[in-house]
Image (cartoon, rainbow, N blue to C red):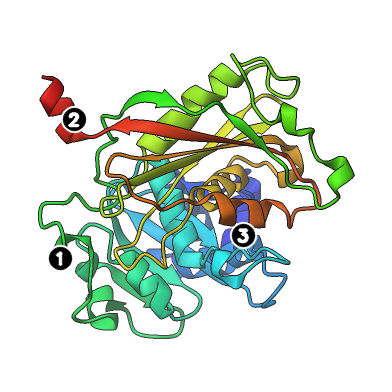
Amino acid sequence: MAVRQVLTKMGLQSSWRIAAAEVAAIKELANVDEKTLLEQLVEHASTFSQSPVSQFKVGAVGVGDSGDLYLGANIEFKGCSLAQSIHGEQCVISNAFLAGEKRLRKLVVSASPCGHCRQFMTELPHADDLIIDVMGNEPTTLGALLPSNFKTTDVIPDAKPLLQHQKEDMVVSATTPPSLIPLLSNDSEKEDENDNVVENGQHSLMNDMDVMLVYAVLSAATSYSPLSRCFSGVVLKTKTDKYITGSVIESAAFNPTLPPLQVAYVNLLISGLAWEDVTHVVLSEGTDNHSPASVLAPTCDILKTFDVVPSLIHVTLDIVSDKEKSSEN
């Protein structure tokens, strides 16, 4: 029995994650070894691709130290800058990040990782030893694919790598009043200027603002942003009152950084939901070192490309730095 048939039989045909126990069951039912299983899962993962621009489908599977498998595919946003795309390898890493996986030991992918992804993967624990298995080629390592690479620990030697970093012990001293950002191009459809501020959580669009702010701060605190110290998170509220979060995943080279909306979008798909299910988006961002970086503009750019444009609430966090915390003590 083919792996895809087994997935259907087990009700896993739409799953982006496969637990270690399920992996063992699939191997037994399909009568395949790990190599064959991973190759067939890569082909299966490519069916998750959303590639309206390139029409090129990439599938990828990451193997965690836990034994769990993380599927990923490339995701493009029609009508938006190509730089906003989520590469298949980034999708896998976001999946593992969201699941709390501590290390990936192997990545199997349908096409050779581009330079963008090779740089992004250097943030992982023991990155040089990460096995990269491109379909139809002999396995190699990330260190062989990107020798003399530049990563965060070159700047901050004792920095914890991605997946093993700690949630920030963040002290938010204040926030700006949450602002409703107009996204529609037709001025007559925009909110009145006086309605752009949510005060005391009382806005017709946001009667549960306090709940969303808690998720927004938590998603920002989960950011992996060791160099810029610009913490940002996104919360997607759905029609069924689910809260889907995403946090920025920073690259030492900055450009391959995956913004929080993209990570939240991956989380949405993993949760079995679609963009049509989203009613509100909250973007929270702040820094403890006066960094001028912001992901507001690219977040707006992506949101405008969807057929359904949800309400965007922007919150700026005033974060107390470690130095300020020390002086208070």
Which image quarter holds the C terminus?
A: top left
Residue visible at 34% across and 84% down?
A: 138
In the rendered view, tell whether residue 127 sits above or below residue 226.
Answer: below
Amino acid type of disc 3? Arg
* Image side of residue 283 versus residue 323, left or right: right
Residue 106 as seen in the image, left or right of residue 297? left
- x, y percentage for residue 320? 27, 30
Residue appearing at x 22%, y 57% in the figure: 125
Secondary element under disc 3, as helix, strand or loop, is: helix
Residue under circle 3? 4
Check the image and name the residue furthest to the front: 194
Q: Residues within 10 Å of mark 2 (few under 14, many from 20)?
A: few
| Within-10-Å neighbours for mark 1: few <14, some 14–19, many 20+ | few
Q: CA distance from mark 2 to mark 1?
A: 26 Å
Q: What residue do we see at 32% from left, 79% from top?
A: 139
Q: Which residue is mark 2?
A: 324
As drawn, the residue found furthest toward the bottom would be 137
Q: Residue at x 73, y 57 (%)?
A: 305
Q: Is residue 42 above or below residue 277?
A: below
38 sits left or right of 197 in the view: left
**Along the line of sight, which residue is nearer the eye, 241 or 312?**
312
8 horizontally vs 233: left or right:
right
Q: Point out residue 204 in the picture as x, y percentages from the top left corner.
A: 75, 20
Q: Earlier in the sequence, mark 2 or mark 3?
A: 3
Q: Which residue is mark 1?
A: 154
User: Which x, y percent locates residue 175?
Assistant: 45, 27
* Quadrant in which the N terminus is drawn: bottom right
The alpha-carbon separation of the residues under discs 2 and 3 comes to: 55 Å
